Image (cartoon, rainbow, N blue to C red):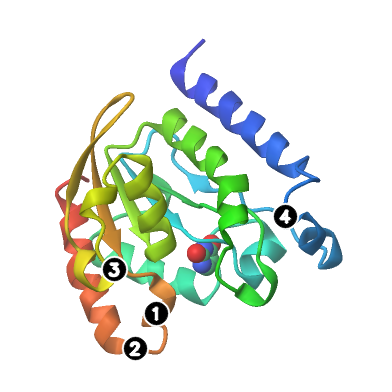
């Protein structure tokens, strides 16, 4: 089977599994709020994958990642380096919205993390840009870089080399775009940090 077809099928299996995840810690939020899980979207042959934390209200309403206020910032950042949203893959660790947008709980990360792991194996990105500290912690731990973990205030904009099952990758921790909504200084920092991704386009 053609590679892209194989990837589409594998992603569809993940989507079906997440939709059927009635025992997930956030399933009741989905039904209570008539919300959707957010699987992710973009190119399945992307060199770059952006990993956020969890869907917010707009995302859970529509099923699309980063389509609210944080998404506007993300779009602006991608535009600033001439990167089209469709050319990367955008997803989150947690696929359902935590109530009131609170931070994801450890058990939620345990429940949804394996889906992200499989998405990475399907897409085989060269670069994983983590958005926010939860995503940074998860990805750095996953790729055995726990000993290099620092607070995001120190780690943002650095490049960490790691080995994935399919080859060498670079992990780039970035601040979460939500932090830049009301903070222009963080937005400038994010813009600077996004320049790092240019070399991988
Ligand atoms: N914040 C995230 O981490 N992910 C989204 O999809 C939206 C907001």
Q: Which residue is mark 2?
A: 183
Tell me which label, 1 or 3, sits earlier in the chain.
3
Alpha carbon distance from label 2 to label 4: 32 Å
Circles 2 and 1 in contact, beta carbons < 8 Å = yes
Q: Can you tell which of label 2 and label 3 is closer to the viewer? A: 3
Alpha carbon distance from label 2 to label 1: 7 Å
Circles 1 and 3 in contact, beta carbons < 8 Å = no
Residue 158, percent from left and from top: 17, 59
Residue 142, percent from left and from top: 38, 41
Q: Place residue 15 in its image quadrant.
A: top right
Q: Which residue is mark 1?
A: 179
Q: Which residue is mark 4?
A: 25
Near-viewer residue (24 or 148)? 148
Residue 131, percent from left and from top: 38, 62
Mark 2 secondary-structure assignment: loop
Alpha carbon distance from label 3 to label 4: 27 Å
Mark 1 secondary-structure assignment: helix
Tell me which label, 2 or 4, sits earlier in the chain.
4
């Amino acid at each position: 089977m053609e590679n892209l077809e194989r990837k589409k099928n594998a992603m569809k299996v993940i989507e079906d599994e997440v939709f059927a995840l009635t025992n997930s810690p956030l399933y009741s939020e989905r039904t209570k709020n008539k919300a959707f899980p957010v699987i992710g979207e973009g190119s399945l042959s992307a060199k770059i994958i952006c990993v956020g934390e969890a869907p917010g209200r707009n995302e859970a309403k529509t099923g699309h990642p980063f389509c609210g206020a944080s998404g506007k910032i993300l779009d602006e950042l991608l535009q600033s380096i001439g990167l089209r949203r469709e050319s990367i893959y955008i997803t989150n660790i947690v696929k359902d919205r935590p109530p009131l947008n609170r931070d994801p709980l450890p058990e939620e990360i345990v429940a949804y993390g394996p889906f992200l792991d499989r998405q990475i194996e399907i897409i085989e990105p060269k670069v994983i840009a983590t958005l926010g500290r939860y995503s940074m912690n998860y990805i750095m731990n996953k790729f055995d870089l726990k000993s290099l973990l620092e607070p995001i205030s120190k780690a943002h904009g650095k490049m960490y080399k790691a080995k994935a099952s399919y080859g060498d990758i670079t992990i780039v921790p970035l601040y979460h775009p939500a932090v830049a909504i009301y903070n222009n200084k963080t937005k400038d920092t994010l813009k600077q940090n996004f320049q790092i991704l240019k070399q991988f386009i």
